[in-house]
Amino acid sequence: MTEINKAVNLFNGVCQQLGGEPNPPYQGEVNNYHFSRGIEDEQPEFWKQYGDFVRISDGIDFDGIIFHPLSKEDENNIFLNNDILSEEKGFYNEALDGFIVIGSNDTDTFVFNTENKKWEARDRIAVDYVYDSCDTLSDLIIVQMERLKKRHGL
């Protein structure tokens, strides 16, 4: 079993223990996407890990912890959440240039930092402040799972 499989299965297990339901796997194609905001089109490390993640669970949305799905039918998908941050859409924040926004919790924004290739939890207001910097998406999911368990006394 891969690290991402382990991380997602552990997170989903905690969700189910607390009464939640895991998201089904993504069934569509995983392709490159032009995120704009200074992000190069080719992001093989991002797509490798995020693609593996959504093939297990098309996003996570439980108890305020969100990892955006790829499914374009979902109104909270990764594409819409990044497009809205572009200059053309009006919610541009230059502090997010170079970051692919992958989700959030009550206080943080989860990003893939295209410069250092880290998966990070950054303060929603003071984006320069990094709470967690992980080498893999699996590690970031595990950090969020541990916080969820602590919040619920598990």
Image (cartoon, helix red, strand yellow):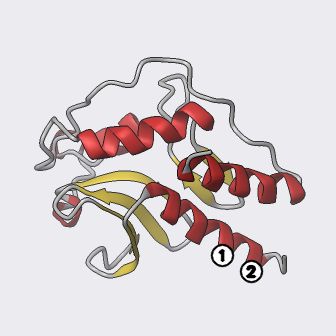
Q: Which mark is residue 112?
A: none
Position of the N terminus, as image quadrant, is top right
The image quadrant of residue 89 is top left
Give me the residue at 12% from left, 42% from top: 40
Q: Is residue 17 left or right of residue 114?
A: right
Residue 140 drawn above or below residue 129: above
Give the amino acid at mark 2: Lys
Q: Which residue is mark 2?
A: 150
Secondary structure state at the residue bearing disc 1: helix
Residue 24, position in %: x, y?
A: 68, 30
User: Crowdedness of circle 2 by 10 Å Cα count: few (<14), some, many (20+)?
Assistant: few
Q: Is residue 137 left or right of residue 38?
A: right
Q: Are marks 2 and 1 in contact (CB under 8 Å)?
A: yes
Comparing 31 with 123, the one in front is: 31
Q: Which residue is mark 1?
A: 147
Give me the residue at 37% from left, 35% from top: 79
Give me the residue at 82% from left, 75% from top: 152
Q: Is residue 4 left or right of residue 22?
A: left
Give the amino acid at mark 1: Arg
Whether residue 77 is visible, yes or no, is no
User: Crowdedness of circle 1 by 10 Å Cα count: few (<14), some, many (20+)?
Assistant: some
Residue 97, position in %: x, y?
A: 17, 57
The image quadrant of residue 124 is bottom left
Residue 140, position in %: x, y?
A: 49, 64
